[in-house]
Amino acid sequence: MLTTEPTTEIEYARGDQARSGRLWFVPTPPPVSPRERDVLLAVADRLTNAEIAERLFVSVRTVESHVSALLRKLGARDRRELAGLAAGYAGDAEVAVPGLSEPATSFVGRGVELDTAARLIVESQVTTVLGPGGAGKTRLATAVTARAASGFPGGAAFVKLVPARPGYVLETIAAGLGVEPAPQQRLLDVVADRLRGRALLVLDNCEHVVDDIADVLADLVAANPRLSVLVTSRERLGVPGETVLQLGPLREVGEAVALFTDRARAVDPGFESDPAELADLCHRLGGSPLQIELAAARVASLGVSGLLAGLADDPLRMLSAGRGDRRHRSLRAVVEWSYRLLTDEERLLLMRVSRFADRFDLGDAAALCPDLPVGAVADLLGRLVDKSLAQRGWSLLDGVRQFAREQLDASAEAGDVTGRYLTWAALRARDLTTHLDGDWRAEFDRLAGDLRASATLEPRPDLVADLARLTYARGFLAEAREHWRTAARLAGTSAEAAAALDHAGTAAHVLTGGARDHYDLLREAARLTADDDAASAGCLADAVVVATRFRGAGFVARPVPRDELAGLLAEAERLASASASAETRVAVARAWLSGPTVQAVTMPAAEAAVDAATAFGDPLLVSAALDAQCTAAAGAGDPGHAYRVTLRRLDLVDEFDRTFPQAALEVVDTFRAAVAYAVATGEIADAVRIGRRAETDPTLSRHTCWGSGSVVAPLALAGHFAEALARAESMWESALSFRQENNSTLGVPLLGAALAAGLTGDVDAMATWRRRATRFAGSLSDSPNLAPLDAFVRARVALHAGSEDLPALLEEAGGSFAPGRFDGYAAGVAAEIAVITGHPDADAYLRRADRHAPENRWVAAIVTRAGALRDADPSQLKTAAAAFADIGADFEAASTVGQLS
């Protein structure tokens, strides 16, 4: 057993504090403020003061002040020593590590290896604990993680890869981390974002997916060079920066004897034996921890002398002959020996449950044993646990599972067990789909390896379709897309195949924004359903809607000629007469193609589509039809009507079935449009309320670009500057983490942040936010939407500051912009600047802004204020202040009141 050597040294908690062989006395660290804690952890992440300021959105001078205070409080001599003290403030002494289970047994021996592993995970990017089955790799990794987790401010996670199938390693890691992507987020980016800063990722049992692991780790380490990865495997990964810790037999006979004694007393508390005899037994067992544990489990019935006699029988004769690794043959021999000592019923159950990829419960095991009562299955499982062939919580050690599976495959009942296994998997998948509105994710994660294995072993249409739906709901969009494509190939009818392809196309659309891929799959679905007029008509109509409603980069690269779309619509109209569903889809497609150009929707066609969809009763179709009506109203210069229509769409979002990807498209578009038109009509309080609702919506809450991002500009217009900047910072970090650099829609919230920073007097931060908007959206002056917003932001900040640049900004803000959300805002602030500066054409600027006033309450209020300033009319200033307050523009209301004094 390990010994402890007390010491009087006293230090604050550090990552390497719990060194084996020494007892460290750790006092409570001095208290620090929440902001000081944030700075301290950032110092531990090796950030410069400028980088810390950027992360926390404070000034560099403020960071310097906090660092100086921390050096005094904690008695540190420099930043390096300060960083070493950060672990004491990273969390409680007992750090919760996702995926790390409380060991059922004590950790005995391996003191040198434990110290070495703890050192390597600090020094190396990738540490691989390499060894044969039964060497104790998992147990060592568990002990190292428990010891070292507090030294990683970015957190630690332990992921078991036993159930992972080739091709699904990243999904297994994501499930272990408890993360899932939102629409248009790559799964890799979401995983990398969870492992930011100085973080530790432990991946256990990687040998069966070595190639996948190597690829994933290359990406994760590239995304975060400060990430430490600890891997257990029987093979090297062969990745750059890998350090290998070879784990062989226990180093000392004393360690082996201590381990045997500990495990023997678990089954026989009074166990005592001659030390020399035990040393001989452990030597015969090769010092392998698993072999020692398997043998110790038999000591109550056989005694040490009986174990020695058993080990002299046939199995261990394999040690002296044959090819292959000697330790591996030794392990197999002991497993085989343990297997032979089982009763027939115990052997039968062990073979059957070896079919499972990893963990199983009593009901799962019973499903493979229809000839046994559930009580008997429970009893047999308990016996296998007692004999160390199964683990509590029902799982098999890897070497035991492999051996038992070989016995199953060679047995007469292999086919029957596999058939029951496939049926069990299909039933479990179907059952999970009925609980998607509840707490189902943990159960899916437990079963995912078996469901994927079953879908590969013998693809059944129902299982594959259910697995597609489950993986989509779990956030694994790329995987779901492929399952739906497989389901389409396996479908029993052309209509089922078309539905599966539609789901696959929509998943691709949600995943990447690739509407063109969605269109192509709908065309393929229409060809598959040539024998079903209604299904084919629906697919053709949906293809027209996708191509006209969602104009993404895919259509820019591969445009669809209007003549082609008109032909598809005509064919859909010809085929749709016998189906209410198809006729409704055709009505919606007709609306979206009704105008002379793309998205030039005519109101009569849009209203007809809304009537048809409402009568049919599908909320998704109603939303698509209302979007057409909203587009028609906006195109006619009536944003107020567009906003009212969008509010009707908002009422529908809770009716959508979120377990299919079609709902995600409607949810994202509905919230985007609702916030946009609320701002366009000057309903600032509404825009804030809707944006905050978007932040908590299940589809958008994980995507800060669409959740928090949507509320930044409304918050800035409302005058909630600190909140706007906090949301913007979160959105910015998310955008960088999830590679949204080409997402021009982020230009609006980034300019909203610039407005908030500028109106608080931080001109440097304002310039930073404008640069960020340019980085994402390109030239702001070339964007019909962003050009007037940028002009408004700079003009409004200059007006607030009394800048000398007002005349030049008047010319820019008062210029001619395409109709949109922000041209009225630019015209309004230009009118006020013209009045303030005494411009000779101030009345003309006021008249121009006043044209926006009927449809935009914010513009109406600023026109009233500008007119009051021109006329020196205090009563009109009070009217303007009340108008701003009524729409939730608190900053403008306060500014107006201030001008009364």
Image (tube, grey):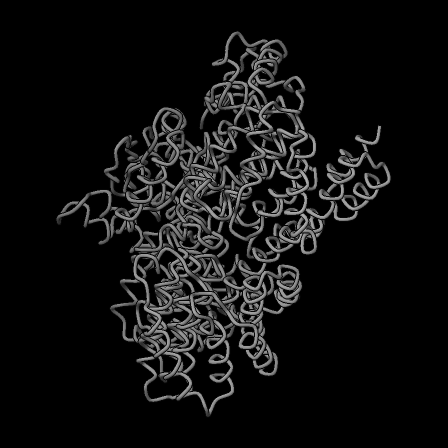
Q: Nearer the viewer, residue 228 or 757?
A: 757
Q: Toward which corner of the image does residue 495 lie, by quadrant? A: bottom left
Left or right of 669 on screen, residue 278: left
Q: Residue at x 46, y 69 (%)?
A: 429
Q: Residue at x 37, y 88 (%)?
A: 532
Query: Is 370 located above or below residue 272 in the figure?
Result: below
Specify the farthest residue to the top.
Answer: 77
| Res. 804 visible in picture | yes
Q: Position of residue 629 (x, y in %)?
A: 57, 69
Q: Nearer the viewer, residue 594 or 809?
A: 809
| Res. 368 visible in picture | no
Q: Toward which corner of the image does residue 565 lie, by quadrant? A: bottom left
Q: Position of residue 185 (x, y in %)?
A: 44, 50
Specify the farthest residue to the bottom.
Answer: 578
Q: Position of residue 644 (x, y in %)?
A: 67, 63
Of the 4 image quadrants, the one containing the N terminus is top left
Query: Is 131 located above or below residue 503 in the figure?
Result: above
Left or right of 284 on screen, residue 541: right
Query: Is 710 located above or below residue 410 in the figure?
Result: above
Q: Nearer the viewer, residue 358 or 32?
A: 32
Left or right of 862 on screen, residue 343: left
